[in-house]
Image (tube, rainbow, N blue to C red):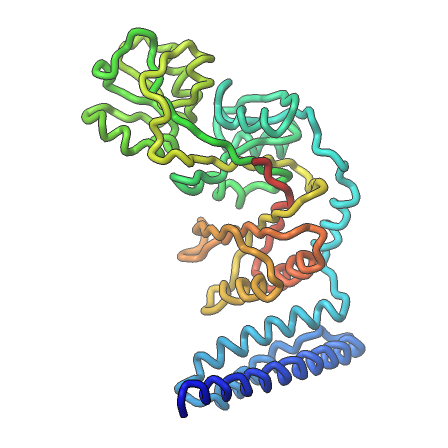
Amino acid sequence: MDQQQIMRQLEDVDGQMSALFARRMDLAAELAKARQAQGLAPTDLAGQREAKQRFQQGAGEALSGYAGVVYSTLLDVSSSYQSALCGQTSDLCGRIAQSLENTSQLFPESATVACQGVEGAYAQIAADKLFRDAHISYVKNFEAVFSAIASGFCRYGVLPLENSTAGSVNRIYDLMMEYNFSIVRSVRLKVDHNLLVRPGVKKQDIKEVFSHEQAIAQCQEFLKTMPGVKVTVCENTAVAAKRVAESDRADVAALSSHACGALYGLETLAADVQDKGNNYTRFICIGKQPEIFPGADRTSVMLTLSHRPGSLYRVMSRITALGINLTKLESRPLPDRDFEFMFYFDLETSVYSPRFIQLMGDLEQMCETFRYLGSYSEVV
């Protein structure tokens, strides 16, 4: 056969498969309704396992593995379709609906907000971008932000989640596993680092530079131009600037913002020294209770999966089958389990979409543990 003949035969096979797929989905729906009438779950896991084995055997030894992947995907799609037709809703879907109903139609203009660091920190700048009148309480570390929310000391907290150059802030992901909270909004902040010194200090005088570890990672190329200079990690860039301003030493500098330079009376020896010009940090605004404000089109979840081949693939295929865009996937090791991980997902979908509700119900059933972290919009 020539290429055109092969392509025509492939088209014929695809047409047959499409018709058989539709027929199989109809039968799966009928089976689910019959099982529901008997008080049974829509899907029979033991029966599915046996059916998958038969499907693989029918494909032959050489194609058995590929057939298993195809059939697993088919079963996932069928299960999602069955659940939707049977009108199954989870407790989570009910809580999401309640949050949508109870949340104010307007994001608050004024609120008490916990931020890590001191005046001038990027978290404070992010808070001021989120709220017209933010009453900020500064705390020592990231965990204290979560604690301030958990205790009710502050209504909201603002935390850095990831940077376009240096990547994710791992400590935040670890704390997410320990605390209950809800993401209510996010904001992207343009970050520009500057070499700040006390008035009169020259670049050749500098023996030590203070900054946050993320800022240091974002300015590696510039720091290479200062060989022999000690680099010291601080809680954040504003603390670094304050530390330089309050020091009696004439040989220290800070990598920090223009705002901190003005706030603490420091001079800028070198401006915008980050490695890349498009340097953005994404901050999340968290609260104790779920609040879903109008326009929410992003959702974050955390989950753990059974430790067997294909577990993550099944989740990914379910997201794909529902046509939902996955914008971030992060994994962090579970502290009490060897070589097992917590997965963090960011999904781009309207909270009002039926596909979103379907996915939340599906994932809650598919995962060992599943945490809905919130639906929100992002301020740019």
Q: Does residue 7 appear anywhere in the picture?
A: yes
Of 77 and 43, nearer the camera is 77
Compared to residue 87, the image places residue 11 above or below, namely below
Give how far across and how far down residue 210 sits, in percent: 34, 22
Direction from residue 168 to residue 94 in the image, left or right: right
- Quarter containing the C terminus: top right
Q: Identify the residue at image location x=45%, y=52%.
A: 331
State how many labels appear: 0
Give how far across and how far down residue 48 sits, in percent: 60, 80
Compared to residue 67, the image places residue 224 above or below, namely above
User: Which quadrant of the figure has residue 85?
Assistant: bottom right
Direction from residue 10 to residue 216 in the image, left or right: left
Of 21 and 11, nearer the camera is 11
In the current view of this chain or complex, which residue is farthest to the bottom?
A: 1
Compared to residue 325, the image places residue 197 above or below, namely above
Give how far across and how far down residue 340 sits, in percent: 44, 57
Q: Identify the residue at image location x=41%, y=92%.
A: 1
Give how far across and how far down residue 268 sits, in percent: 35, 16
Of 340 and 107, nearer the camera is 107
Q: Identify the residue at image location x=64%, y=47%.
A: 297
Q: Does residue 181 appear anywhere in the picture?
A: no
User: Which quadrant of the figure has residue 204?
Assistant: top left
Direction from residue 35 to residue 205 in the image, left or right: left
User: Which quadrant of the figure has residue 215?
Assistant: top left
